[in-house]
Amino acid sequence: MFDNATNTIVYDASDGIFSDVYDASTVVASYLQQSDTNQIADQQAVIQLRSIHYEGGEDNNITIKFYNYSSTFVTIRWIDNKGQYSPSHTWILAPYEELNQQTSAGHIFVLSIPTNGSDEAVLGAFRPKRTLPSGTHHSVQVHDGETSDYILEVILAHRYDALVVSSFWLNRNIVMKQTRQDATKTLKILHKIVSNVIQDRSNETYRKLRLSNDTVKRYICNWAVLEYLRVLGFQKKTLANDQGEAEGEEEYLIAENIPDDTTLALYVRGLALIEILQSRCQPGFVADLAPPTPWEIPIQPNDNGSGNRRGRGGRGRWGTAGSTNMMNPDDRWARVERARNFRRSAGPRPSPGNAPSDRGRWGRPR
């Protein structure tokens, strides 16, 4: 019998962008169907998904590493995206063991621990959505908790993946929500901070920001910007002022260590992400004509290449074979016009640079 009595904290460092993590109560209530006797035989076990509906792309080359850092055995059961479970796809990890597993996007892995006899307590479930932008593996870890019985967490093993996640929130909170002027100014300052460190990493002035500065307070003291800088190594520090007076202490954002070559390479890739965001602030930006960002699931091809409203990409766009940046301009215009005709809002074809976005609006989406 499955139970969700275990007090487990669930944490996903990707914020649901590259994977989904479900807590025990959600898994037991929605996804696990027990037999009438509430007993599950070893070879006759059936775990059925009831309400999971996956709409991401088809990625068949995803690697997951499961780590059991707890003091008990952890059972991992694989479920495909149709809700089918095979008893042969069951793994038991002893304490401090790990498992490398290849899978496809949308497949489910349910993690549980033994309790009494044949009973098990579910810790949660993990579902990958796509390969990580860095190309590294998904990392799922189980720990003994301090304030709870267990911790089930998804870790981003590569810092670039964490930087992409923070860029996603920059796009959501800065580009999409702020005025174009404020968003442009924020990204310009952020671009200057990162590029200064790249040009002269040993200069401490470039790695130190005073949080009481008016410009910093207005444009940098946003949690999305601070998270981006945190991934690059910046941390909040309280320091005495230049006169050394205790009552004159101020808060700074500082990258104390001089970036090594690996970290500097991360800065360079981070600068490219900022430039992508800057392009999305331009007055002539059109979402349909822009290449996909690292945090988006590319639109997948259809079987007949004709395109449909939701398709396999599940992003609610009309599409033909390949992702947006694989289409020539004529195909992009054809896709936009099909979308407009579907919404019965056809009108005169706009001039270049003023095409409707995928949301059926003109120019940059808001």
Image (cartoon, grey):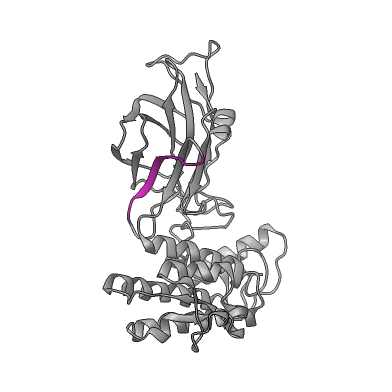
Relative side of 360 to 259, left or right: right
Farthest residue, direction top: 37
Magenta segment: 136-147
Comparing 157 with 72, the one in front is 72
Residue 43, compared with residue 271, is above or below; it is: above
Q: Position of residue 97 (x, y in %)?
A: 28, 37
Residue 115, compared with residue 351, is above or below; it is: above
Relative side of 223 to 260, left or right: right
Q: Position of residue 100 (x, y in %)?
A: 29, 41
Q: Is residue 82 visible?
A: no
Q: Position of residue 63 (x, y in %)?
A: 33, 46
Quadrant where the C terminus lies?
bottom right
Q: Residue at x 65, y 77 (%)?
A: 350
Q: Quadrant of residue 255?
A: bottom left
Q: Quadrant of residue 359?
A: bottom right
Magenta span contains residue 140:
yes
Q: Position of residue 195 (x, y in %)?
A: 41, 83
Q: Is residue 365 visible?
A: yes
